[in-house]
Amino acid sequence: MSLTPRWILLVVIYCLSACSHVTPSSQQAAVASAHPLATEAGLAVLAQGGNAFDAAIAVSAALAVVEPAGSGLGGGGFWLLHRAVDNKTVMIDGREVAPALAHKDMYLDEQGQAVPSRSLDGPLSAAIPGMPAALDYLSQHYGQLPLQHALAPAIRYAQQGFPISTYYQQLAQFRLSTLQSSPDAAAIFLQNNQVPELGYLLKQPDLAKTLTLLAEQGKAGFYQGEIADELIASVQAAGGIWQAEDLANYRVVERDPIVSSYQNYAIYSAAPPSSGGIVLASIINQLSALPFDHASEQQRRHFIIEAMRRAYYDRSQWMGDPDFVSIPPYLTSPKYGEQLAADINPTKASQSQNITTIAPKGEDTTHFSIIDQYGNRVAATLSINYPFGSGFVAGQTGVLLNDEMDDFSAQIGAANGYGLTGNEANAIAPFKRPLSSMSPTFIENEQEVMVIGTPGGSRIITMVLLGILDFVEGKSAEEIVSAPRFHHQYLPDVVQLESQGFDQQWQQELLDYGHELKMLNRQYGNMQVIIQQKHNAQLDFASDPRGEGEARSIRLD
């Protein structure tokens, strides 16, 4: 009897599940994050007897303090977990939620046109944060240590301060006017209302107090009581629409990850309201249906770009919060990938305006990766959306609010801050979670596993894809995080290239296929990767050289 692609996928997943438990021959664990102090916090908690999930709490909270441009208590994220003792893989959805008074026309002007600044700046752009609830949830359901232990490093960093870096200065300059418009934000993140000088000691005593209440009282210390009251009063006074019930009713959701396969590897990635897992599966399924393995290097790049184009088209049409919209299940099926791939010309670029639905027949943001001594692992991508989020700090809480409302479709077909277009599936509605590109991912077979993810807005998914392809080809963690990156997202109809890594011949080869290229004036992403060999638990890890992060291991004998 011949096996259908679906049955092949189920067999691969079953086999990997049966053999995925790791019994390390050495008591080694590793953390890769976007800031050395966050990596240090995770390793310290592991050294105290915590597991990967305790370390994830520590790293998440530390990044909220020392990398405020990327994430924070005022934001949210997705934590992809694998628990070794029972082979459970699950996604913790701590994504922000639209407040009760939100409506689909809230960012339109009198002519019915979207006003981008309204969904990017100030408290009206902020959804209800999920980060504090997620940290408490991780501690109660997966951690081994009290929440106070896991949050202790972050509280210390907030109290004692940390010296700011060139990277911080660049992002603060980018959002300077927005930060200046919030007196509470300017008092914390600026120096004399300007970008601080290099090495300036940034202290956040109000945030330390908020973290302490969270440590002592759990979720209630943030979503109820004095912190909640201060958040609501401050937001409303500045024109926001939050209400006490919005905070009190926030809930973390456990979701099954999106599972796909490539060659003999299983891939576990983020589920909706992230588009990451579905878009990855679509691209992988298309490449599997094409003569990808036997193509030349230039044709492989052409195939990748064309598969990106089609997957991002489906993202714009169908994806949103699964609690509000029905996302077609066929989007991740290998058969649908074959149908998409059949439309790809092997020698000529498509035009995005000609892409239509093919119904089936029949920077900013942060990421960290952890593997502990028990074989548990975490891939987490966290965000407050644009650098420094809304630029608004809520009163004396020290909490910098997100501007994740911009991830909704403010107007059908209008681009958000990252150039992504959306449809009715991602329209604004009360209590709805905005569509995301965050893609924390595991990929494994019987021999090895990789934990991978990155920030980067709309480019997150394609960065993870390129990392997966490099991993399957046997490249090291350092090679994976250092490789040059290219990206296509359906609209705008251009291939975006990093400012470094692509010579004239490389570019000309794509031009010969008919692709339009856009060379960016910078590099992008901040990938964090850990690879483990299952037979001996040997670790290989790296932090993206584009950022200021650090990947380190610790031996726990």
Image (tube, helix red, strand yellow):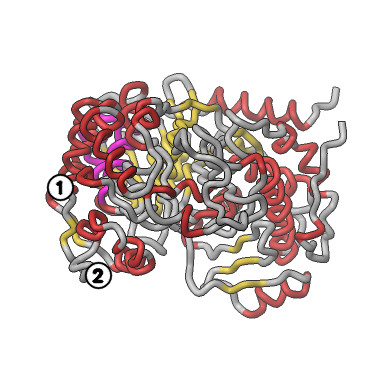
Residue 437 x, y percent position in the rendering: 54, 47
Residue at 52% x, 27% y is: 255
Question: Which comes sooner in the sequence, label 2 or label 1?
Answer: 2
Res. 126 in view: yes
Left of 122 or right of it: where is 328?
right
Q: Which residue is mark 1?
A: 205
Res. 540 in view: no
Quadrant position of the N terminus in the picture = top right
Q: 177 or 108: which is nearer to us?
A: 108
Left of 319 or right of it: where is 36?
left
Residue 194 is marked as 2
- For this orientation, the residue located farthest to the bottom is 504
Q: Which residues are magenta?
A: 41-65
Mark 2 surroundings within 10 Å by alpha-carbon count, few (fewer than 14), some (14 through 19), many (20 or more): some
Residue 516 x, y percent position in the rendering: 70, 71
Label 2 – label 1 distance at C-alpha: 20 Å
Residue at 23% x, 54% y is: 184
Q: Is residue 53 magenta?
A: yes
